[in-house]
Image (cartoon, rainbow, N blue to C red):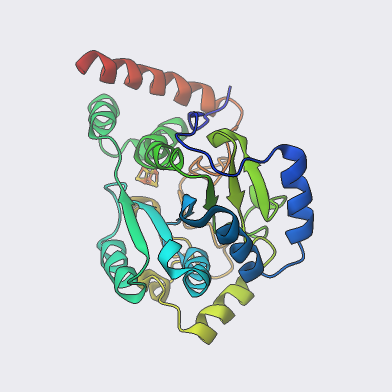
Amino acid sequence: MTIEAATLEPVSRGPVFDDLEIGEIAMNLDDLEPWDVIEWAYDTFGRQAGIVTALQVDGMVTLDIAYEIAPDDVRVLTVDTGRLPQATHDFIDRVRERYPRASVEVLLPDHRDVEAMVQRSGVNLFRKSVPLRFVCCHVRKVRPLTRALRDLDAWFTALRRDQWASRAAIRKVELDHDHGGLVKINALADWAKEEVWQYVEDNDVPIHPLYAAGYTSIGCEPCSRPIEPGEDDRAGRWWWEEDAPKECGIHCPIDTGNFEKEAEQILVQLENRTEARV
Ligand code: SF4
């Protein structure tokens, strides 16, 4: 069993592709630059494509390219987990100012889920065990995003192949079977970190202020820290954990031996508790 985002039937669906078709499209797009991939996406899906981002540098580059191509179609979806640094809230305002024609949608977790989780396991449950950290990410981040994805036909991610082992095989366009079969667009898949930062410099893209403080991956305040020299870029996320993937579960089901079984059981208990109170 794996912790998967709930598979939801789409509310509306424009262009629908099967695995064969999306495989052919991916082959055609794989050698193209991010702007070509993003242009294809807006030509195909228009406003039914959303940029899902925590407003880190890769997401900001995706947004900047998208805004150049189709400013009135740009929808940015970002989650306020309730545990974000104040700097991220400030940065959201800055993004709105810089890209005024884009719509920036801030998604919130269901307060009943959060209440049930906190009452059961405490507000800092993520420090207690890996399964409880998965549960926290699932309730605060994965569920709100999964709900939002239900209304889209395609979503842009800022994933790159060199970020983490679990991302090494991503294609520029994929079918996302974990979220109802919508299209997942990884336009920056083959870019290296240096290319991303070069784009930022060349195009004066605003970046999250915590990069200047030594952070290389920025999420919730208690689960992100600056990295030390020589550490991997994602080493500052959930740094106290051993042998656990540095993923929240939105991009891939978390499958880590026995951790996920315990987390799944806790989620079922939370679900029952929430339902009993409605
Ligand atoms: Fe919870 Fe930390 Fe995940 Fe944020 S990053 S949702 S605080 S476990």
Residue at 57% over, 27% down? 2
Measuring from the top left, give residue 231's x and y in whole percent. 57, 63
Using the image, determine if residue 236 lies above or below residue 113.
below
Q: Quadrant of the N terminus?
A: top right
Count of numbered marks: 0
Which residue occupies the extreme bottom position in the image?
Answer: 202
User: Residue 250: image x %, image y %?
Assistant: 50, 42
Q: Nearer the viewer, residue 238 or 59?
A: 59
Residue 176 figure quarter: top right
For the point 67% across and 52% down, which residue is it? 173
Tell me if 56 is positioned left or right of 19 in this view: left
Q: Is residue 139 left or right of residue 177?
A: left
Of 274 and 148, nearer the camera is 148
Question: Where does residue 72 sit, x and y in percent of width and height?
Answer: 41, 66
Tell me the quadrant of ligand 1: top left
Q: Residue at x 63, y 54 (%)?
A: 164
The quadrant the C terminus occupies is top left
Q: Position of residue 101 (x, y in %)?
A: 35, 69
Asked if one can make out residue 219 in the rendered structure from this viewpoint, the answer is: no
* Residue 91 shown left or right of residue 27 in the figure: left
* Above or below, comparing residue 109 to residue 104 in the picture: above
The answer to whether 120 is drawn above or below residue 54 in the figure is: above
Residue 210 showing in the rendered view = yes
